[in-house]
Image (cartoon, rainbow, N blue to C red):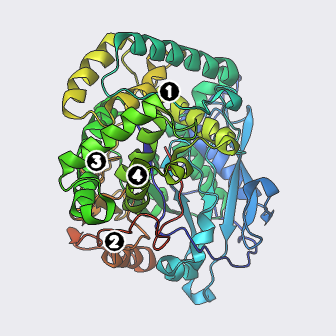
Amino acid sequence: MRAGAKLGLLAGLGSLVVTTLAVPPALGADAPTGPVDESGAVDEFQGTAIAARRAAGAGITFGVCPEAEALPASVSCGTVEVPLDYGRPDGRKISLTVSRVRASGPAEEYQGAFVYNPGGPGASSMYFPMVTGLPEWKRIARAYDLVGYAPRGVGRSAPLSCQDPGDLPQGPTPAPVHPSPSFKLERIAEAKAYAEGCARRGGTALRHYTSLNNARDLDVLRAALGEERLTFMGASYGTYFGALYATLFPSHVRRMVFDAPVNPSRDKIWYRSNLDQSLAFESRWADFRAWVARHHAVYGLGATPEAVSRSYEVARARLAEKPAGGKVGPGQLQAAFLGAGYYDDYWVPRATALSEYLRGNDKPLIAQAAPRPKEAPSVENASAVYTAIECNDAPWPADFAVWDRDNTELAREAPFETWDNVWMNLPCAYWSGPRQQPLEVRTKRGALPPVLILAAERDAATPYEGAEELARRLKGAVLITEEDAGTHGIGGGPNACVNTHLENYLLRGETPVRRASCAPRPEPDPVAPGSRARQPELSRPAV
């Protein structure tokens, strides 16, 4: 399941001077202690309590960030040690990298550390403290230390790898909407080889990269930061292990924001979530085509959504015959335009690139869609973590015939993303090692402080039904809906109504009595092909 999320308006990030954290307090009330057997094995909940107690004593020593993090001097970095296996807290340890900018306001406004995770699985929030300079975050940054981190497996946090980054395709790739039997056999072989590569490179440690361990790591990070209770915002996949955290450690929660929530139902994790997601992307692809059609005078791609589809298919056919710059084939085209399903910010540059390509100028499309060799190591790492966590988290169909049946039927209704989603997740059919049964996400009324859920009504990466399901399961949760909008991740973005609810909650603990709605943000303004005005920085969405 592709479930990445980004913060709104990442351009123009600011920074502040950083100092050190206060002395950490003791563990929360529901953290047990008890005997360890002769082999060092304990219950994983107990193992988390042991690790958190040690982290509280050690704290985090923040200093200059390593050059590899590419962060400004205003951001400080450190590490926190966590067990690889929480059932053996005295066994092998791994270090998670952490970043921080101290609160900018006076002492009387200070509310502690605010931890953010952007999703993935496989995404890092080491960049997060840089939002301190954005207008949408300034008041929150006055009250909180902004804390980012790289979860286990990501970046320099005990990094996972399943293949040599140099083996990633740097040339054009196919992307048939309705793949042939021979193409399916090729992708099955690739999925098997990838799963074998994960097992070979990850070894016995591979099975410990799970959502449950991400939740446990979060509690150790809380303790290391000196926080008795956690203030946390998770986006996309970050909402899933955030929900696991709320279920496991409700008394450790101070405030939690779930932005673009994953459906936490056990039967959705993760195979059926992908089916739901592929269906939702079809609607979002229709939203984009309808917008392009309304601006036919600018882009010349068709005055109806159907005409825009025909323009897109013409481009696919041309790229299959002659890849743009020898690098961009139908697969790269599909990956680039998937970004338009995630974020409205991509609508203008993608429409411009398609229009320019069909007019004979392929440079914008190459700039947006061509493989980037320098990014290959981080792309490979993110893919490895994504695959390991989703494959370890839950059982998957082991017979390709099940995948073939379900997705062939779905692709008749939702061809845009269905088969690409299959190929991304197919290694889970051939995964070695034990699979977990997903935890039942649920809290009793009164066990958890009020939490805030943010969701766009037409989000494709995490369909809106997931937000409603999470609100039902976390008693006392309040859902804020951006109506008739589909950008994936809405907190801290351009919608002032959403941001008002976010600030009221984080700064004062205030929520609406039940739920609330916000009008959608304005649609992007079209830009004539060739214009440089209003073009966002071009980048790919996180997986």
Element at label 4 = loop
Q: Name the quadrant containing residue 160.
A: top right
Q: Contact (CB < 8 A) between labels 2 and 3?
A: no
Q: Residues within 10 Å of mark 2 (few under 14, many from 20)?
A: few
Q: Contact (CB < 8 A) between labels 4 and 1?
A: no
Q: Contact (CB < 8 A) between labels 1 and 3?
A: no
Dividing the image into 4 quarters, which one contains the N terminus?
Answer: top left
Element at label 2 = loop
Q: Determine the residue positioned at 66% across, 44% down.
A: 375
Distance of mark 1 from mark 3, alpha carbons? 30 Å
Distance of mark 4 from mark 1, alpha carbons? 47 Å
Is residue 334 or residue 480 the one in the foreground?
334
Q: Taking 445 as reference, is 223 left or right?
A: right
Q: Which numbered disc, 4 or 3, marks the residue closer to the eye? A: 4
- Among numbered discs 4 and 3, the one appearing first in the sequence: 3
Q: Taking 494 as reference, is 225 left or right?
A: right
Q: Which numbered disc, 2 or 4, marks the residue closer to the eye? A: 4
* Amino acid tagged 4: Arg
Which residue in the protein does label 4 denote?
359
Q: Determine the residue positioned at 51% across, 56% down.
A: 29
Which residue in the protein does label 3 denote?
285
Q: Determine the residue positioned at 33% across, 36% down.
A: 417
Q: Determine the residue positioned at 59% across, 46% down.
A: 217
Question: Whole-percent x and y of residue 266?
Answer: 32, 34
Distance of mark 2 from mark 4, alpha carbons? 21 Å
Which residue in the protein does label 2 denote?
525
Q: Which mark is residue 392?
A: 1
Is residue 433 or residue 460 the one in the foreground?
460
- Among numbered discs 1 and 3, the one appearing first in the sequence: 3
Element at label 1 = helix
- Among numbered discs 4 and 1, the one appearing first in the sequence: 4
